[in-house]
Image (tube, helix red, strand yellow):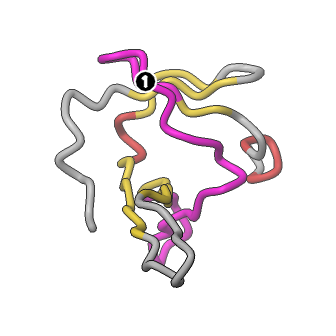
Amino acid sequence: MLLSDLAGKEIINLYDGAKLGLVGDADLDISLNGSVEAIILTSRGGFSGFWGAKEERELLVIPWQTIKKVGSEVIIVDLHNKSEKIR
């Protein structure tokens, strides 16, 4: 499978049906031997006010072994909780 095959696919959590993001907006964690270890999504939270309020960003690390199915339009992952979330 090529990285271009994953681009644009929506990532859906099997556990709660939540849309986690798009692969096109993600980074990949690749080991030294070339295997993909995780998909890393960046979400933007908070707000941007008139005075340039700081925008919060959260990272969600989706381990590759949690991927259950790669379909034509979506990738199904099984995250029982978002314990991998990093701020």
Q: Which amino acid does label 1 sit on?
A: Ala
Question: Which residue lies at the image location 27% right of the left edge and 68% below the top edge?
Answer: 87
**In the rendering, at what x and y percent does residue 45 appear?**
43, 57
Q: How many labels does the image show?
A: 1
Does 56 sit left or right of 69 as displayed?
left
**In the rendering, at what x and y percent does residue 78 appear?**
34, 26
Tell which of 19 and 55 is nearer to you.
Answer: 55
Tell which of 42 and 6 is nearer to you.
Answer: 42
Q: In which quarter of the image is residue 68?
A: top left
Tell which of 48 and 4 is nearer to you.
Answer: 48
* Residue 14, above or below 81: above
Question: Which residue lies at the image location 54% right of the left edge and 21% below the top edge?
Answer: 69
Q: Quadrant of residue 75?
A: top right
Question: Which residue lies at the image location 30% right of the left edge and 17% below the top edge?
Answer: 15
* Residue 42, above or below 10: below
* The magenta stretch spans residue 31: yes
* Residue 16, above or below 77: above
**In the rendering, at what x and y percent does residue 4 appear?**
82, 50
The quadrant of the picture occupied by the N terminus is: top right
**Residue found at the far right of this picture:** 4
Question: Which residue lies at the image location 49% right of the left edge and 73% below the top edge?
Answer: 33
Q: How crowded is mark 1: few (under 14 residues within 10 Å), some or many (20 or more)?
A: few
Q: Quadrant of residue 22?
A: top right
Which element carries disc 1, helix, strand or loop? loop
Q: Name the residue under label 1.
A: 18
**In the rendering, at what x and y percent does residue 44 appear?**
49, 59
Give the magenta range: 12-37
